[in-house]
Image (cartoon, rainbow, N blue to C red):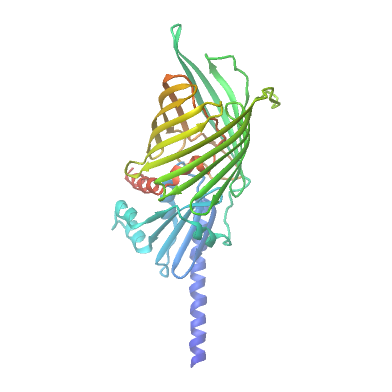
Amino acid sequence: MNLNKYLYFVLLIVITSRVFGQNNLKTAQKLVEDGFENVKVFSQIKHLYVSYENNRYRFEAVALSKVLELIELDDQTTNLTILIQNKGIGITAIRLEKLDLESFKSGMLSIQDLVESMTFTLSVDALNRQFEDIEVFNPSYLKVDISAGVTLDYFLGDFTNSIRQKVNVQPEFNTTLGQGIQLTARYNMPYFNEIDDDNFNNMNLVALSNDFRLRNNQFLNISMGYFTQQQFGFHSTYNRFLYEERLKLSVEMGLTRRGYLDEKFKPNTSYLVINNTLMGGLTYRWIKYNTDIALKYGTFYKQDLGYQVSYTRQMGERYIGLFMKKTTFGDLVGFNFRVPIGERKHLKPNRFRVRSKEFFELEYNYSGKDVAESYSTGQNILSQMSEYYPSVLKSGLIATHKN
């Protein structure tokens, strides 16, 4: 009798594990078919775990909404945990109950109530370890993204031509070489120029970047190569998040040398001065309005010492901000904005992918001369972090289902 009970128990475990395995494989297959990458799925004691990386949808909240739609839930599952990745690194976790998700899908629960029942967090150290040895479906590594965008420079105040403009077309190459490692190259092609004599095609950016996630919501980015503003060198940025996204501490360090890449991609660095950048910053996020109030102080790459204060409101994919800069070179006030452009849903991420640039950005200097200038080292996790904030994912989910 005891032997029969034992055999029955073993058979029950085998059958249950097989059902879990089939549903996990089905969930992974549906996510991959829709274009999600670095997909991992496993079950543990009635708990389903799903991890993915989005390179299909322009906005992370839209991608999360699609994942919730595609996930397969069986009778054995009671809880669900989702881990969102960037370049193979886990960033944000979402936890919810199966009953709430099923009630939402059946129309019995509103999107507001579903979001309120979900738990969002940036604290994913233990969860990242759980996913370490799980099989990966559709890795994101060694794939190539080619995007094209437009930048606008301007000059005001000349009576002969009150607004002078310079329009550049900038195709960009991106590939992820491994976990957190990305190679970026951007080519600049002047299309319309009333400002200067810089009318030849040249490289605007060539950089190798490595992102690291450290313990307790600490992130580090190290970049080296040829940056914007004609700077060759090295740059590192450290961010520490406290109380989720509510408070961010940052430190930036850079060593660069002025030069440029000519039409034949040959480096010219006749400038002997080494520029050292060293800055510290503090950002407070007013979560109710998804607004950042930030202070940055230190030595900027042109070697002026001073501070920058900014106020930035994030409205989903749109950003608008005010800033004030004061350094040993002078004062400056103005505003900036970023708006989405191009397709909201990109082509499936195959080995070679062509798409439009996702955003258009512009900074307007209302008064004063250029001070506290910075260069760009290309895309990295820290520059994209605000899309993964729990507050942004919550409001983005609600907005997605209202549209």
Residue lying at the far bottom in this picture: please name it: 1
Quadrant, the C terminus = top left
x 43%, y 35%: residue: 295
x 51%, y 72%: residue: 17
Q: Left or right of 73: which side holds 11? A: right
Q: Position of residue 299 (x, y in %)?
A: 53, 31
Which one is in front, 121 or 339? 121
Q: Left or right of 274: which side holds 156? A: left
Q: Position of residue 110 (x, y in %)?
A: 29, 53
Which one is in front, 281 or 3? 281
x 45%, y 30%: residue: 307
Occupied quadrant, residue 349:
top right
Occupied quadrant, residue 400:
top left
- Looking at the image, residue 347 lies above or below residue 226: below
Which one is in front, 17 or 60? 60
- Looking at the image, residue 358 lies above or below residue 219: above
Q: Position of residue 77 (x, y in %)?
A: 42, 67
Occupied quadrant, residue 97:
bottom left
Q: Position of residue 383 (x, y in %)?
A: 50, 39
Q: Left or right of 251: which side holds 395? A: left
